[in-house]
Image (cartoon, helix red, strand yellow):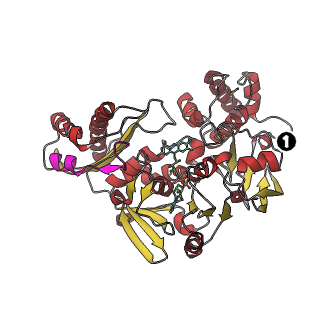
Amino acid sequence: MQDVSYYRPSSIKEAIKILSEHGPTAKVLAGGTDVIVQARERTKKITAFVDIKKIPDVMGLGIEGHRGLTIGAATPMYQIYNHSGVQEEYPAIIDSANIIGGKAIQGRASLGGNLCNGSPAADTIPTLIVLEGTANIIGPNGERKIAIEDFCTGPGKTLLQHDEILISLHFKRPAPFSGSRFIRFIPRNEMDIAVVNVASQIQMDGNKIESSRVAIGACAPTPLLLKEISNFIQGKELSQDLLENAAELFNNLITPIEDMRGSPEHRVDLAKTLFKRTMNDAVIRSNGEKVQ
Amino acid sequence: MSKKIVISTDLNGDITEFIADERDSLLDALRERIGLTGVKEGCNNGNCGACAVLLDGILVNSCCVMAAEVDGGSVTTVEGIALENELHPVQQAFLNEAALQCGICTPGFLVAAKALLDTNPEPTEEEIRFWLAGNLCRCTGYDKIITAVQEASKSMQKK
Ligand SMILES: Cc1cc2nc3c(=O)[nH]c(=O)nc-3n(C[C@H](O)[C@H](O)[C@H](O)COP(=O)(O)OP(=O)(O)OC[C@H]3O[C@@H](n4cnc5c(N)ncnc54)[C@H](O)[C@@H]3O)c2cc1C
Ligand code: FES
Ligand code: FES
């Protein structure tokens, strides 16, 4: 382990002060499932951990009627997927939270950590994007908000400054007749990094597609929102032919890399399949029914 | 040299104070500073579950926790799961079913299985497999482990 100091501030102000004074090698510590491993394996230079879990603002979650859902950035996954309101209204968040590592990882891992770590294959980010999540951030110069689709700028890179803290994520109340779904493909059943992952959100007007959002991970330097797909299907009658035709757009929309997990062709095929599956499941959920 | 810090935590039911390096993981501190060698190091990166403990009652991998984080909290290791005068039902069931060979993975499985049965006393086979997906065993094979957890669940229902 690198020679790290450990701080446990009880307010955001105090945490920002420590981060500012230490400079970029001081890292926020949420669940630690990425950053403690990075400190040990020396993949990043880290000299201090600023543990934010005693700061009430970043812990816990709640739904406030029409105002939607707010999730503290450091809230562990198990609290998120055990929340009945999230299960009811934001099932795609459950799809994602349920598969981050195994149970012992879910006892610690947070949405804030998954987002700020900025992996192109992160399993919550496509979901947070299609649900139009906003990131609430506080830094030395005050508060700001960033749409989650703009948050990641490259592998391991985000718009967050080193002395800014992601406080919470906010999601508006889902529209009536809307549904969302996240699915990833991995060669094992659990505990692996996505070859491709896709989240879809859809709002129906009878059998017509009122609006949609589709995001994909592990196919570009960051998770991507694919507006072209939504533009293509918007206002049209839902049919399997329509989804097939929309899926063909992936041929030109993504240029995934070749690595040990898959070839570019394999990833494009997976993207098409996962797109169709997530869309069909999102439609089922838009009718208030359960999938699987 | 890393700074020394004093940590006070409820460890297996006893308030315990110990000195650790500021950079110690909880796994390092439990094994090297306190001598609780039931907790095992497999991968040291969160993937194998051999180092699983309960932190404030929640299942975590102690290699992905800083020792300093447990100051003021509570930790349960495999050494702390037995009952007053007898083994915990999952421990007894692992013995009955011969659900171990080399035993390196066993403490992690026991702690994880206890955590499962505490929240879900009658899990289905699928639920057991899903819950234990973060625990790897390279020699016993998983069937006996799953059977042992099922047996423990049954014996806990009888009590
Ligand atoms: C065995 C294992 C399996 C895994 N499986 C998956 C998986 O299936 N899918 C997946 O997507 N990921 C997986 N991960 C990666 C990791 O668990 C997730 O990315 C997790 O969500 C990270 O959250 P954390 O709270 O542990 O983050 P931390 O490790 O605490 O932090 C991650 C990074 O974000 C920064 N950060 C955290 N919170 C904030 C904040 N509020 N403000 C500013 N910066 C912040 C930290 O400084 C650090 O750089 C796995 C990891 C392990 C070890
Ligand atoms: S040693 Fe901690 S998970 Fe493997
Ligand atoms: S008994 Fe040897 S690894 Fe499981």
Residue found 55% across the figure and 47% down from its top: A106
Note whether residue B134 is visible. yes
| Residue A184 position by quadrant | top left
Classify A252 as above or below A127.
above
| Residue B49 position by quadrant | top right
Quadrant of the displayed image that contains ligand 3: top right
In the picture as drawn, the residue positioned furthest to the bottom comes out as: A141
Classify B73 as above or below A94.
below
Q: Residue B112 magenta-drawn?
A: no
Q: Position of residue A162 (x, y in %)?
A: 50, 66
Residue found 81% across the figure and 44% down from its top: B36
Residue found 57% across the figure and 61% down from its top: A27
Chain of the residue on which disc 1 is drawn: B
Magenta segment boundaries in residue numbering: A218-234
Is residue A83 rendered to the left or right of residue B97? left
| Secondary structure of the residue carrying numbered label 1 | loop
Residue found 66% across the figure and 26% down from its top: B145
Classify A98 as above or below B146.
below
Say which of A150 and A41 sits in front.
Answer: A41
Which residue is disc 1 drawn over? B84
Note whether residue B123 is visible. no
Question: CB of residue at label 1: within 8 Å of ligand 3?
Answer: no
Say which of A139 and A70 sits in front.
Answer: A139
| Residue A144 position by quadrant | bottom left
Is residue B133 rendered to the left or right of residue A228? right
